[in-house]
Image (cartoon, rainbow, N blue to C red):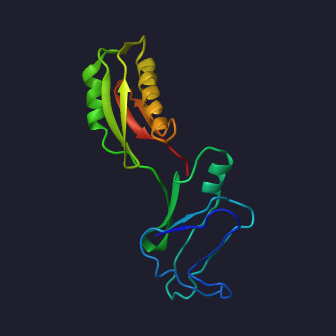
Amino acid sequence: MTLDTGSGYDTVYLGTIEGNETDGSLDNIEGMLHLLGAGPEAGDVLHINDQTNGAGHTYTVSNAITGSLQLLRAGRSGDVVATLGVGDAIEFNLGHTLGDTTAALAAISGARSGNELTTDVNFDLVYDSTTVSVTVLAEAFATAEELRTHIAQAVDAQLIAGGFYAGDVVVGLDLSEVFEFNLKLHEL
């Protein structure tokens, strides 16, 4: 379930109703709940109440995670998703997905000789259920790190062309100088 409050000052009642904020239950909320706002503006209000339940539950609510990311321009909507999880715990998860990268890594490996791509490499990455087609041009480099940067620039260019952001998919290099693809990390 998603509740999009739009822009402006918003008041949300979760498990309770206006005028009866001291009573309520979250029992009817099943699965994920996403609260989306265009803010945060000072003056937005979230009322959460589960006091009608006889069983004790623990909830943790924090505006600092999504609010601080947006204020610092270090994130955007969807980077961190708050959901109601097992035992009615509020969970914070990364909101982006990256599909299987095995074929992409095999394509790079097949064209790689040391720090060189001997032929152009074409592969697809599935980011947030969208296929992003990438072409990395053949070129030789002095180090594996320079080759990693070359691949990352090609991936970033296609992410941007697809309406995403540079760095959403990170091209990594492990200790054995084998490439890997990962989602951008967000600290919670």
Left or right, 151 with respect to 76, comes to left
Where is residue 161 drawn, in percent x and y?
A: 47, 36
Where is residue 4 drawn, in percent x and y?
A: 56, 66
Q: Quadrant of residue 172?
A: top left
The residue shown at (66%, 62%) is: 7
Q: Quadrant of residue 37?
A: bottom right
The residue shown at (41%, 25%) is: 151
The residue shown at (48%, 73%) is: 88
Using the image as rendered, state which of residue 75 and residue 55 is in the foreground: 75
Left or right, 128 with respect to 80, comes to left
Q: Is residue 149 above or below residue 186?
A: above
**Residue occupying the far right of the picture:** 42
Using the image as rendered, state which of residue 109 and residue 44 is in the foreground: 44
Where is residue 93 drawn, in percent x and y?
A: 48, 56
Q: Quadrant of residue 6?
A: bottom right
Using the image as rendered, state which of residue 89 and residue 6 is in the foreground: 6
Using the image as rendered, state which of residue 57 and residue 42 is in the foreground: 42
Where is residue 184 drawn, in percent x and y?
A: 48, 41
